[in-house]
C-alpha cells in the first residue's frame, strides 16, 4: 500500500511539473508587441488594378508548385524523397517550375543556383500558423508555441518581412484559431495559399480583401508524399513567366500575372490516366481589363463562372459558359473570377481592385495599418513574465518537496 501511495505521489508530481514546464514554454515563447489596428477600409479609387496587364499571349503559361517538402536531415523530416526525385515526379505531370519549402530549412535546388528560391516554411507552432518565406539568406527560428492573438501573428509577419523578398500565408483554413476578425487586421504577406482541401470558396481571402488587404492567390500541393496519387498534382498555378529562374519567378509572383487551379485526382491511383489527363487541363485563354470591364475566356466550357466581390458576394454568374464579362461598378472595391468545370477542376484568378494611381502604384502599395500600443505591450509582457516566474517557483517547490 505504501508503494502504491509513493508511486501515485511521484506520478502526480511528475504530471504537475510537466504541466508547469509546458506553461513556462508557452509563456516564454509568447513575447510580442501588442498592436493597435486601424479600422478596415475597402479598396477605393478611380482606377482599377489589373494583375494581368502584362499578359503576353505569345508566352505560354508555365505550371508551378511552390509548397513542396523533400527529405531533410534530422528528426523533423516529413518526406522520404530527395529534391531530384520530387522534381522528376512533377515533370511527369507537365510541371515547369517546382520550388522547395521545407520546415525551417533552406533546400538546394538540383537544377542550379539560378533556380534557387531560398524559400522555407516558417513555423513549429501547434496551431499550424505557417508562412512560406521567399528570397531570404537564413532561417529565423523564433516562433510562438501557441500564437493565439492577432498581435502575435502580425509580429511574425513583421519580423519575417524584414529580411526576405515576400511572404506567402500558408493554408489559412488549417490554421487553428484564425478568425474573420483576425483576417481583417493581418497584413504583411504578398501571397495567400488557396484551397487547403476543405473549401473551393476561399472565403478567408475575401475576408482580407474586403478589409483592404490585397494579396495574390496561389494553390499548392503542400507535398509530402509524391508516391501517393491523391497528394501530388492536385493543385497548381499557371504563370506568365519567362523561365523558372528565381529572378523571373520573383518578378511575376510580385506582380500577379498568374492563376491558380484545383485538379482532381484523375484515375484514383491509375498513374497512366493521371499523367494523361494532367496534360490536357482546362485553362484561361484570355483575361484582363478593358476600361472598367473585366473579362475571362476559357479553353472549354465550365459548369459555371462566377465573379466574387466585397464580403464574398457573388456579383455575376454565367452557367455552361466559356467566357464572362463584368462591368466593375464604382462601388465595387474588388472582383475576382472563379470557374467550376464538370470534372471537378476549379480555376481562380487574382483580384482586380480599385486604387488611386496618382497616390500609389497599386492597391498593394499602402501604408501599414497597424502600430505598437506601448502601454498594452508593456502590460502584456509583464503578465507573461509574472506567469513564467510563478511557474518556475512552483516547479522548484514541487521538486524540493519530499
Image (cartoon, rainbow, N blue to C red):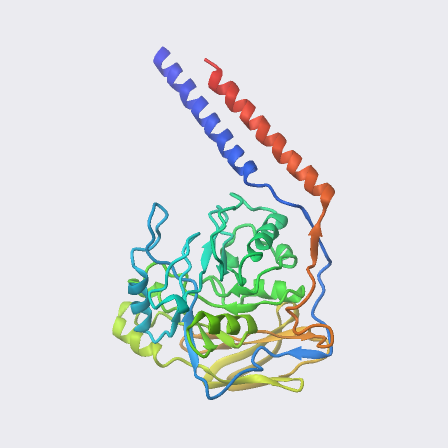
Up/down of 204 relative to 280, above or below: above
Above or below 114: residue 148? above
| Residue 77 located left or right of residue 374 | left
Can you give x and y, in whole percent of width and height, for residue 228 in the image?
30, 62
Horizontal relation, residue 338 to residue 41: left or right: left
Indicate the quadrant where residue 108 lies: bottom left
Residue 364 placed where, x, y %? 64, 68
- For residue 70, side relative to residue 324 (left or right): left
Quadrant placement of the N terminus: top left
State whether residue 300 is above or below residue 14.
Answer: below
**Can you tell which quarter of the image residue 71 is in?**
bottom left
Residue 138, x across and y down, in percent: 47, 54
| Residue found 33% across the figure and 50% down from its top | 73
Q: Residue at x 62, y 55 (%)?
A: 182
Q: Is residue 216 visible?
A: yes
Q: Is residue 296 visible?
A: no
The residue at the point 37 percent across, 11 percent down is 2
Quadrant occupied by the C terminus: top left
Could you tell me which residue is drawn at 36 percent across and 64 percent down?
A: 109
- In the figure, residue 46 lies in which quadrant? bottom right
* Number of numbered markers: 0
Q: Position of residue 261 (x, y in %)?
A: 45, 73
Instruction: Report the residue that reaches farthest toward the top.
Output: 2
Amino acid at each position: 500500500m505504501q508503494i502504491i501511495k509513493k508511486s501515485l505521489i511521484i506520478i502526480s508530481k511528475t504530471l504537475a511539473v510537466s504541466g508547469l514546464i509546458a506553461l513556462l514554454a508557452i509563456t516564454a515563447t509568447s513575447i510580442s508587441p501588442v498592436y493597435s489596428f486601424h479600422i478596415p477600409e475597402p479598396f477605393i479609387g478611380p482606377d482599377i488594378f489589373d494583375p494581368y496587364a502584362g499578359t503576353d499571349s505569345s508566352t505560354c503559361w508555365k505550371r508551378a508548385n511552390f509548397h513542396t517538402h523533400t527529405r531533410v536531415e534530422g528528426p523533423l523530416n516529413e518526406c522520404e524523397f530527395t529534391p531530384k526525385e520530387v522534381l522528376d515526379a512533377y515533370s511527369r505531370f507537365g510541371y515547369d517550375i517546382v520550388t522547395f519549402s521545407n520546415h525551417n530549412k533552406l533546400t538546394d535546388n538540383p537544377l542550379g543556383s539560378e533556380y534557387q528560391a531560398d524559400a522555407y516554411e516558417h513555423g513549429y507552432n501547434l496551431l499550424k500558423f505557417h508562412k512560406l518565406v521567399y528570397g531570404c539568406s537564413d532561417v529565423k527560428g523564433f516562433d510562438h508555441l501557441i500564437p493565439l492573438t492577432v498581435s502575435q501573428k502580425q509580429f511574425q509577419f513583421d519580423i519575417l518581412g524584414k529580411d526576405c523578398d515576400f511572404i506567402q500565408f500558408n493554408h489559412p483554413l488549417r490554421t487553428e484559431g484564425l478568425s474573420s476578425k483576425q483576417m481583417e487586421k493581418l497584413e504583411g504577406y504578398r501571397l495567400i495559399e488557396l484551397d487547403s482541401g476543405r473549401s473551393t470558396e476561399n472565403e478567408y481571402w475575401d475576408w482580407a480583401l474586403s478589409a483592404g488587404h490585397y494579396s495574390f492567390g496561389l494553390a499548392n500541393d503542400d507535398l509530402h508524399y509524391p508516391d501517393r496519387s491523391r497528394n501530388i498534382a492536385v493543385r497548381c498555378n499557371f504563370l506568365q513567366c519567362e523561365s523558372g529562374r528565381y529572378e523571373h519567378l520573383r518578378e511575376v509572383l510580385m506582380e500577379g500575372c498568374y492563376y491558380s487551379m484545383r485538379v482532381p485526382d484523375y484515375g484514383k491511383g491509375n498513374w497512366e490516366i493521371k499523367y494523361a489527363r494532367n496534360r490536357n487541363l482546362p485553362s484561361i485563354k484570355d483575361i484582363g481589363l478593358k476600361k472598367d470591364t473585366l473579362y475571362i475566356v476559357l479553353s472549354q466550357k465550365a459548369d459555371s463562372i462566377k465573379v466574387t466581390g466585397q464580403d464574398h458576394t457573388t456579383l455575376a454568374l454565367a452557367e455552361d459558359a466559356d467566357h464572362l464579362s463584368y462591368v466593375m461598378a464604382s462601388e465595387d472595391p474588388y472582383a475576382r473570377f472563379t470557374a467550376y468545370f464538370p470534372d471537378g477542376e476549379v480555376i481562380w484568378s487574382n483580384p482586380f481592385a480599385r486604387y488611386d494611381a496618382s497616390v500609389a502604384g497599386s492597391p498593394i502599395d499602402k501604408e501599414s495599418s497597424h502600430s505598437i500600443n506601448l502601454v498594452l505591450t508593456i502590460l502584456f509582457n509583464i503578465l507573461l513574465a509574472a506567469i513564467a516566474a510563478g511557474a518556475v517557483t512552483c516547479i522548484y517547490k514541487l521538486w524540493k518537496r519530499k
